[in-house]
Image: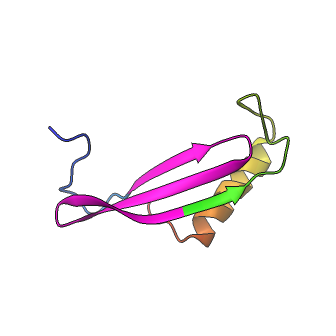
Amino acid sequence: MPLFSTRSKRTPIIGLDIGSYAIKATQFGVQNRELKLVGYGMLNLPEGVIVSGNIVKPDYLKEALSSLFSFYSFTGN
């Protein structure tokens, strides 16, 4: 059984990496019953938003995520 179902085209698969210095996002779609990378974006974070793996400034992180998804036109929920 595959890890992700390729039957539904309605729900995009989005990967998110939140690091100390940047946020990276990827979006995958289904084409010909295979997962394909359809989007990638990255946004640098200022020092102090994430410290030792802890979110220190959640409001800033929320705005940064919103900006990242808006700028790179990611779709989905």
- In-image side of 28 versus 65 (left or right): left
Please indicate, yes or no, whether residue 77 appears anywhere in the rendered image.
no
The image shows residue 15 at horizontal and vertical percentages of 47, 49
Q: Is residue 26 above or below residue 73?
A: above
The image shows residue 41 at horizontal and vertical percentages of 57, 62
Mark count? 0
The structure residue drawn at horizontal position 67% and vertical position 41%, both measured from the top left corner, is: 19
The image shows residue 21 at horizontal and vertical percentages of 74, 46
Query: In this orientation, which residue lies closer to the viewer: 1 or 12?
Result: 1
Query: In this orientation, which residue lies closer to the viewer: 71 or 17?
Result: 17
Q: Residue furthest left?
A: 1
Q: What segment is highlighted magenta in the picture?
A: 13-40
Query: In this orientation, which residue lies closer to the viewer: 18 or 63?
Result: 18
The structure residue drawn at horizontal position 33% and vertical position 57%, both measured from the top left corner, is: 11
Please indicate, yes or no, whether residue 15 appears anywhere in the rendered image.
yes
The image shows residue 18 at horizontal and vertical percentages of 63, 43
Residue 10 quadrant: bottom left
- In-image side of 25 versus 12 (left or right): right
The structure residue drawn at horizontal position 53% and vertical position 48%, both measured from the top left corner, is: 16
Q: Is residue 26 above or below residue 52?
A: below
Residue 44 quadrant: bottom right
The structure residue drawn at horizontal position 43% and vertical position 59%, both measured from the top left corner, is: 27
- In-image side of 74 versus 23 (left or right): left
Residue 31 magenta-highlighted: yes
Magenta stretch prevailing secondary structure:
strand
Quadrant placement of the N terminus: top left
Residue 27 magenta-highlighted: yes
